[in-house]
Image (cartoon, rainbow, N blue to C red):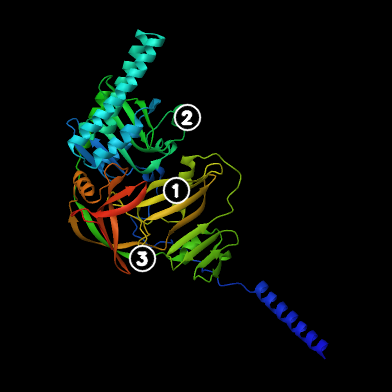
Amino acid sequence: MIEHIKNIILLCLVVVSVILSSMLWYSTPDYAPLLDVINIDQPEEKAGYYQIEDIVKPRAIKLYTEDGQEKIAYPGNIAFTDTMEWLRTISISNIEKYKDVPAASSTTSEQFEVGQDDSLANENEQDINQQQGQIVQGQMLQGQMLQGQDALQQASGQYANLLASERYLSNENSIENCIEIEFFDSMSIEYIKMMIPIDNNELDNFNDKLIKRVRIFVDEDTDTIKCLYIGNNETFLGNVNVTKRRFVELVKDASEQQFTQEKLIIEFSKQPIRVAELSNSVFADPTAIRQIQEKDQSVIYTDGSRGLRINTLRQTIEFTNPTISSRFQEANFPDMIADAIDFLNRHQSWAGEYILSGIEVESVPNNEYTLVFQQHMQGLPIMNIDSFNCAEIRMKMKNNKVTRMNRSTTYLGEQTITASIIPLEKQDMQSIIERRAGISGSEYDLFLSYYPISLDIETVKLQPAWILNQNNSFVTAFDSQTGQEIRE
């Protein structure tokens, strides 16, 4: 009797297994409908076609005039555009490393920028002069031991060069006829050469060191134009192939352009990206798309090889393409950036104006990097924070090709201008930070940006704010009018 029951149960299990297998084999999940429209419903003027020069830009350009005045040009400003066009026409050569300057100058520069008093500035200057004196003494002693008078002349020349470069590293108050290029993050020289051309045979001099800013200035001793590449711990100096007269004229003309101090406070409605249309855009054959619902409420669209994951809880979109050839290719930043821009152009994935703000290294041996595109508004970057993650597009690259894209499921829609303000000057904000935060003497970055504040589930306000970064990480934001820390 028991054997018969076992046989019946086994037979039932076999039948159920056959039925379920046939259901999985012959039936398929619902797939996204085929729609011949763009994926993002955005104003026509924003749905443009971007090229490398539209995306590869610095965060800001500082212009120091002949009388020492400082003017800041942001993307979209005429002075910014004219200066960028000129930078792409020059070439830097004879680049050498300054071994003795960076450690002292980096700290001193940061201390000056946070607005320390004159006494501390004088102490720093004395320390620098003392260190330079020790350098020269050592070089002179070595010269006496080796070749006497010739070595002394060589040491004196190196001392003069150190003084010239130190002047443009430590004391911003004495700078004139200078252009400074600021980046969002420390960048590789391969990226910077896309904006400021460098002879290819000079690249090895940098030894893969990252650069955080570039200064082009007049060397009064030789009446030539020099270029300082200022890194985190090392500094490099090169020659610029332009005459002093032409460079001074360029700085003068750019600084005489109109600089608008007013910044807008803008409210935006949050608009969702139409996911079905995006899925039809990124897959070659929309009829092959299948839709899979996961337990965490994510929805995956796939054609069997590539995938588009929509996480409604986190409001994120992730596209993956593992079909990219695994055959190793040497890293080529122009090709890599061009492929990422072409991907975003083809799939209408821009939701405004963007700048390539960062290149994160994943694996150099495997040629894996992440490109970070930062959205801009009125020439200022929009901060990407936990409560508002709509301002960044992250592209994972392998062998110079796109393998993954991460972005938000929402974007900024219709806008309403609520007010215009004049932000505090940077020097005033630095004094406030020194007094309240007590961070003088440490490395930091202070820049003007748009900070998002959610008014409700459907509306966000962008207001100008001074952003404080330390060690390439966001610390806090200050109201650009009052200097008060912004707390949501």
**Mark 3 Cα shell of 10 Å, populated few (<14), some (14-19), many (≥20):** some
Quadrant of the rendered image containing residue 101: top left
Disc 2 residue type? Asp
Disc 3 residue type? Gln
For the point 39% across and 41% down, which residue is it? 186
Nearer-the-camera pick, 196 or 206: 206
* Residue indicated by mark 1: 371
**Mark 1 Cα shell of 10 Å, populated few (<14), some (14-19), many (≥20):** many
Location of residue 423 in the rendering, given as x and y in whole percent from the top left corner: 19, 51
> Which quarter of the image is occupied by the N terminus?
bottom right
* Residue indicated by mark 2: 204
Query: From this viewpoint, is residue 252 visible?
Result: no
Whether label 2 touches label 1, CB < 8 Å: no
Q: Nearer the viewer, mark 2 or mark 1?
A: 2
Location of residue 467 in the rendering, given as x and y in whole percent from the top left corner: 28, 51
Q: Which mark is residue 271?
A: 3
CA distance for labels 2 and 1: 23 Å
Disc 1 residue type? Leu
- Where disc 2 sits, the SS reads helix
- Where disc 3 sits, the SS reads strand
